[in-house]
Image: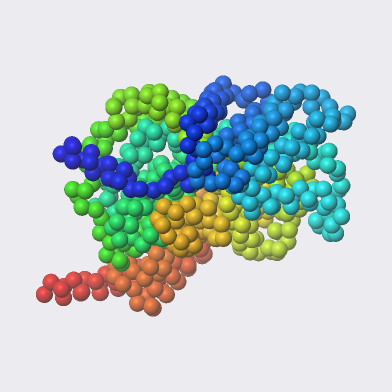
Amino acid sequence: MEDSYKELGKEIAGEKVKVDETQFEGTVTYTSKIVNRVISILAITMASFQLYTAFFGTYKTGVVHNSLHLAFAFIIYFLLYPLRKKGKAARPAMIDISFSLIGLFSAGYVVIFFDEIASRVGFGFTFWDIFFGGILILVVLEAARRTNAVFTGLAVVSILYALWGHNLPGIFRHAQFDLERLIYLQSFSQEGILGVILSVSATYLFLFILFGAFLNKSNAGKFFIDGGFALVGRFTGGPAKATVITDAAFGTVTGSGLVSVVTTGVFTIPLMKRVGFKPEVAAAVECDTSMGSQFMPPVMGVAAFIMAELTGIAYGKICVAALLPAFIYFFSFFLSIHIYATKNNLKGLKKEELPRLRYVLRDYGHLAIPIAVLVWALMFRGYTATKAGTLAIVTLVVVGMVRKTTRMGVKEILSAMEEGTKNALPIIILCACVGIVIGNLIVTGLAFRFTEIVVAWGGASIFLTLILAAIVSIILGMGMPSQAAYLIMAIFAAPAIVKIGVPILAAHLFVFYFAVFSGITPPVAMVAVCAAGVANTKWWKVSFSAMRLGIIGFILPFYWIYDPALLMEGHWIEIFKVMFFVCMGTIALVGGIYGYLLKPNSLWERGLFLISAAILLFPQTPLLDILGLGLFIGLILYQWKIRKAQLTTKTI
């Protein structure tokens, strides 16, 4: 039985699924062993630096620390993301080696001469200050272009606006300042490239992506996947339901929905297709669960730490507030999968095809300890995110020694460090580019006037202002990691929502949800594109399927603006009432969208389900809530009666 389980476990874990994962890890693979060895050494060195500073503190000042972080990223990034050649190559092109070295020298100049540069503020900068500062901006733009050309264009526009926006009329006009001042602000201060955005990458984000790589190397991914399949794999739509459990547990600590898709999607998507899910639906399930995992406390894809720093609200309070919306999101998503699978008669896997839960717990159950340690350190000991993450990584390595199946030797540890660094590189570069945009718009004052613009366009309507903020969050977040997208919206959209009277925590969670969903919304939909590559289908089909399956995620933020009880604020009776009405509204919404609940819905039934959902999912007067609930219960009783009669007829 044990041997049988292991063979089945291998299949479930994807060892028989052939997927080209290199398309996600980089755009080039070198055949030269020497080149690969050099890249590996650089990546491991960077990870070692990050782990050391995570535990012992920032290296010198924040700007210097961020500069060294960026210097490491440059020298590896340009080798993995070449200017021209993709696929396989013997060795890096000279142009890419040149960019690696130029990036290293420009960022390294800040590391070496920061004290001297700081002493020259107000007295004039040297030629070399301006030269290397300008080069740093250009290198960041070129690096970002290789990952996201659209956002790089926005960064260039922000630079042009900073230099010549004083010539514009009206609200867009700002005070004139010269090129030297722009270079100083962008390259040597905390107002630009080396500021708060890159600090997120240099601390929380890199560390938790690294933690995700260690989890992967320790076979924790197999633990989550096999555990999910052992629990629900045999039920209707089993592989998709198992994906929800897997990603909800795994994705919250990886810090990236994209990393979750690449790590678990290559296993779960083929299995969903195997039992009959359409390719675009299978990919959409992976997208929604991977992105939705960032709503789950305690890590929330590191957004909880960023939010605490930006708002001054206690980390624990943010986690408590995020708990109920995350539960309702996954409840809705799980229900949508069940209804879709039931309607299309998609069965689960056979019992003999699935791993046994007791064997999963025996072989891999101890890998839950590092995650428990992480939660304990954050929630009950008050550790910083960086120290808690480092402790979790160390615990994972130590605990993994217990069994051969999870033991990591030196080779596996070094491989995890290399993998984590490579996964983090595009995010580091985009964070640096985001720093350019935010820095320019802050120093020109447009970031603050943007609040006035949104409020003015929204007029006296809170709802219209929220719609505008949601649209802006999705547009500006397209093609970016959700953490960077949230940071932009925390600067632009959140203040506008606060200004119309919304509490600051509700406003930040609002823009965070929409920043996360920018990963699945057209026209960029970066996460949907990656999942489509695994499923071998069109990305736009994945995008629209993901939006349909995860529709509740677009509704919940509006609900808690009008009723903060959804964020666990107020008396427990109010909180329970909100949870009950929202869950009932969610069931009605799923029934209306998919045309199936207890039985196939007629057109008029779908319409009434959607009406009851609209009433229940938008806070109204108690009378309307009761009316919506009564309509929903009446429909359920009607369907139950019809179904019972049909079953009786079949029996006879």
Q: Residue at x 80, y 30 (%)?
A: 128
Which picture quadrant has residue 169?
Answer: bottom right
Quadrant where the C terminus lies? Answer: bottom left
* Residue that protrudes farthest toward the front in the picture: 90
Up/down of 269 relative to 420, above or below:
below
Q: Residue at x 31, y 67 (%)?
A: 343
Q: Position of residue 353 (x, y in %)?
A: 21, 48
Which picture quadrant has residue 593?
Answer: bottom left
Quadrant where the N terminus lies? Answer: top left
* Residue that protrudes farthest toward the right in the picture: 123
Does the image show residue 293?
A: no
- Figure disc tally: 0
Q: Position of residue 183 (x, y in %)?
A: 78, 38
Residue 157 vs residue 584: left or right? Answer: right
Judging from the image, the colouring scheme is rainbow
Q: Position of residue 139 (x, y in %)?
A: 69, 40
* Residue that protrudes farthest toward the top in the picture: 56
Q: Position of residue 381 (x, y in %)?
A: 48, 27
- The residue closer to the viewer here, 357 or 558, is 357
Residue 627 vs residue 159: left or right? Answer: left
- The residue closer to the viewer here, 338 or 3, is 3
Up/down of 594 relative to 91, above or below:
below
Which picture quadrant has residue 308?
Answer: top right
Q: Residue at x 86, y 52 (%)?
A: 166
Q: Residue at x 27, y 50 (%)?
A: 233
